[in-house]
Amino acid sequence: MDYQPLIDRWTGGELDRWAQQLQQQVASGLSQQRYGDLPRWLAALQALPELQPDAIHLNTARVGASTGEPLPTAIAAQLHSALRQLHPWRKGPFELFGVHIDTEWRSDWKWERLHTAIDPLQGRRVLDVGCGSGYHCWRMLGDGAAEVIGIDPTPLFVVQFWALQRYLQQDNIWVLPLPMEQVPPQLQAFDTVFSMGVLYHRRSPLDHLQELKHCLRPGGQLVLETLVIEGALGETLLPEGRYARMGNVWFLPSAATLLSWLRKLGFVDTQLVDVCVTTTQEQRSTDWMTFHSLANFLDPDDAGKTIEGYPAPRRAIVTARLPGNWEPPV
């Protein structure tokens, strides 16, 4: 997991300030002293067989790589075993040389809901906050982004990304092992910033939106996906205790309230792209994520409620822009 090429590319440019910190951030985010399971995950990464793909798939539901002929049985078993050691796989799906990684989330469904409603990514530098293993990062690259940077503080997801990168071999996509708090302030260096499935985990959602704003170039676009409730302007749910068995859920605004937060912070052209109730077909347990999932978090007698009695998960996608005239990066 060598980040030096990215550091070298950023050094001396508009992301030089981040480049100077990145080596230390990566060392902290992938510290074997802090994360006891990391050696096991790295061993799984090393156990992946050496394979050369004939085709790379970034614009299909299952991101991945393939060859013209099926793998020999022993090699396929080695690949499957190494990938299974990186359980649980949350976001996807992926397929590597015939091995279908059936992730907990059908993240391709979310991508289909949003990718035609946002500004074209062709030639843009993109930041994906809370990207997990990087599924949507790969789709952004497939849509023509010039550089995609994902950030996620969970080392397992970062190792999963590198397992995919072993075969997809794209030099303009990176997943960094760090939280939003470690992104240098006032960067103003990204043309599009995504934050999907993060806002409701923040104790101060307005601070998170402000951090995202400071990452954007003038005229750049924010793409935000988060849990919402049905309701009018000003209505927000602050769950007491857990929400859908998650202990770190704070603010669930109505869609109108969410848009008003963005306007309050100076965003313009705020748009509600989509609202939908999350189904147990989109989020579920699989052989690649065998823990409890959405079906276990809902009231068994009323799927319209969580196990705690709150409204079942409903997700909104909104877009907004920073004021100014966006110009394609040089």
Image (spheres, helix red, strand yellow):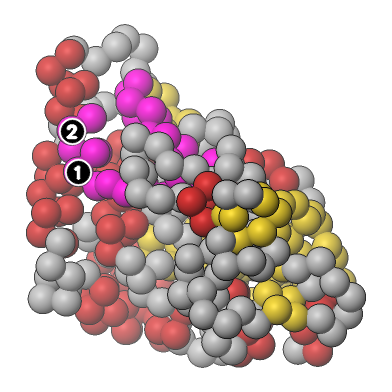
Residue 43, percent across and down?
Answer: 10, 49
Q: Is residue 282 above or below residue 180?
A: above
Element carrying mark 1? loop
Residue at horizontal 29 percent and vertical 11 percent from the top: 70
Three-letter amino acid code of the residue under disc 1: Gln
For residue 189, say whether it is visible.
no
Residue 22, percent across and down?
Answer: 31, 77
Q: Is residue 56 above or below residue 194?
A: above
Whether residue 288 is in magenta: the answer is no
Residue 287, percent across and down?
Answer: 34, 35
**Quadrant in which the C terminus appears:** bottom right
**Quadrant in which the N terminus appears:** bottom left
Q: Residue lying furthest front in this view? A: 301
Q: Is residue 272 left or right of residue 317?
A: right
Q: Check disc 2 and report the residue beneath it.
A: 81
Q: What segment carries the magenta color?
A: 80-108
Residue at horizontal 51 percent and vertical 80 percent from the top: 241
Q: Check disc 1 and report the residue beneath it.
A: 85
For residue 179, say whether it is visible.
yes
Labels 1 and 2 touching (C-beta < 8 A): yes
Q: How many C-alpha atoms fall within 10 Å of the one at disc 1: few (<14), some, or many (≥20)?
A: some
Whether residue 90 is in magenta: the answer is yes
Q: Is residue 64 above or below residue 244?
A: above
Three-letter amino acid code of the residue under disc 2: Ser
Q: Nearer the viewer, residue 112 or 292?
A: 292
Residue at horizontal 78 percent and vertical 56 percent from the top: 275
